[in-house]
Image (spheres, grey):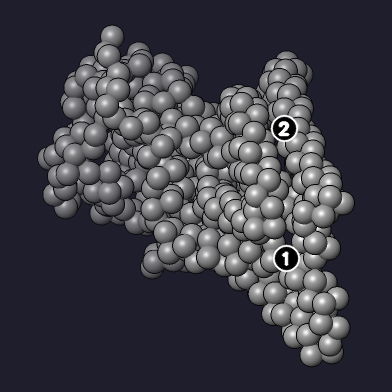
Amino acid sequence: MTTPDTRRPRPASDILRTALRRNRGAMIWGTVLMGLYQAGETAFPIALGLIVEHTMRDRSLGSLGLSIAALAVIITTVSLSWRFGMRILQKANTTEAHRWRVKVAGCGLQPVARDVDLKSGEILTIATEDADQTADIIEVVPLLISSLVAVIVAAVALGLADIRLGLLVIVGTAAIMSVLSVLSKRIGSSTREQQARVARAGAKVADLITGLRPLHGFGGNHAAFRSYRKVSTEAKLQAVTVAKVNGAYAGTALALNAVLAGAVTLTAGWLAFDGQINIGELVMAVGLAQFIMEPLRLFSEMPKYVMIARASAERMALVLTAPPVTTPGSQHPAAGGNLEIDCVRYGTLRDLKFTVAAGEFVAIAAYQPRAAADLAAVLAANVPRDAYEGAVRVGGQELGELSVEAVRAHMLVNPYDGEIFAGTLRTNIDPSGTSRTVPEAVEASMLTDVVALHRDGLDYGVRDRGANLSGGQRQRLSLARALAADSEILVLHDPTTAVDAVTEQLIARNVAKLRRGRTTVVITSSPALLDVADRVLVLDDGVVTAEDTHRNLLADDADYCLAVAR
């Protein structure tokens, strides 16, 4: 057990400080403009009091005209300062939230998992709601300062009329903030728990969507729905708790502000009745007692938003400060090199050893699906280097010594459940828009019938997760994307399980033709793909037990024949 380093600043504080530091300019201008807005709002009753006093004393049209002009200036200042002040702050808020969303998503999408116990649905909630609530600190600070400006202006103006009125505002504001600071801590802890439960519910939804079809297959959907209902109910109950705490906070703040405004009004009335202030000062005091309610409300709500922003920043820190399970290297593989698997032990793999020469087409027939998945995970660098024994070498360089970018540029591992994104067929096949082999990839994957079926062709719209495509169409689209990448080494994991036998035969021939001269590994039990391979490796109980062409293995190996013949 290690002792935490208490000298280091808390990650949540670092995140909030970074957000504030990056938006200094916007916050300064926003504070100035919002300060003008609050000062103008507060100046309105002061001006009314002065107008009443001077108009009653001078009784001249010139004084009245000057007073109207002064009110017009105040109203214009209030209108423009609010509009442009909020525009600056909200733009900065939105931009900062986007920055944190990208940063959290970048950590969550790292090919090597980070050392944090969060599912994809939870990271999604952190990247959206928590990022937004953290960025709210950019608006909170200027609004807090501008509200303080309004309270100070009101206190000074009332103090000039009578010192007791000014002191009443200052003491009352301090008392209100002391009471509300206690409630704001409860809001922070409740919000933190609510976000955690919402994130867990989101993770459960993501799992359900991914596994809904197999769940239906064996009748497990009802149990899964009950499990989701449980976590969803917990999130709902916590949301109700947070709403109650927020309601208590808002009600307390409103009541205390009303008490202070009422106290100022009654005190001013008593002073006017006693002759200690004049009629103009009474009008000013009564007007300020009404206008001060708004800045007091904003001022009293700021601690709540600060605590919410801090709670969200702490959840973001779970992802941002979590160390990666392993650190990728910085080397680059030699072009045109071999793919070597040297005595790899991981999961169901036991001392797995084989070599794929540059330009060779090799098929791997795995008798156990788990072994196929373990091999694909190791090749995709989704497994930390210290989690498996042995070595995987690409172009003579060990996989753990290569940078992630180098691995991705040199070798592509296409999973059997490749994601389909909302967009078009074209953007799914070529997300970067740089591939020169899109037509060839479409033809090789037999996606041509899907393209021809729609008037828009490759620009046909695809829904999220390919909801408007069949299972076979989604699989062919994923295969087309892998082929269009045209990587030096391509690893395909069960690329044709959802297509019919005739289409599978055509795809196998097309892939072998398109990938001629390029290193290709297909982990499959498809006879069509096994037949077009230069050689077939039989993977049984985690080791290679046989190696030959597909047809020779069919003739000589009864177990192989039983496993792959259809």
Q: Residue at x 83, y 72 (%)?
A: 52
Direction bottom: furthest residue: 62
Q: Is residue 110 left or right of residue 298?
A: left
List x then y, in percent, for residue 433. 44, 66
Which kind of residue does numbered mark 1 sit on? Ile
Q: Residue at x 44, y 20 (%)?
A: 370
Which kind of residue does numbered mark 2 sit on? Tyr
31 lies above or below 361: below
- Give 551 or 489, whichever is nearer the viewer: 489
Looking at the rendered structure, which numbered label has been put on residue 235?
A: none
294 lies above or below 390: below
145 lies above or below 403: below
- Give 444 or 29, whichever is nearer the viewer: 29
List x then y, in percent, for residue 118. 49, 27
Q: Residue at x 16, y 48 (%)?
A: 332
Q: Earlier in the sequence, mark 1 or mark 2?
A: 1
How crowded pointer 2 is (Cα within 10 Å; few <14, some 14-19, many 20+) is rated as many
Instruction: Residue under label 2, please give it.
Output: 249
Instruction: Residue under label 1, please give it.
Output: 46
Residue 202 shows in this picture: no
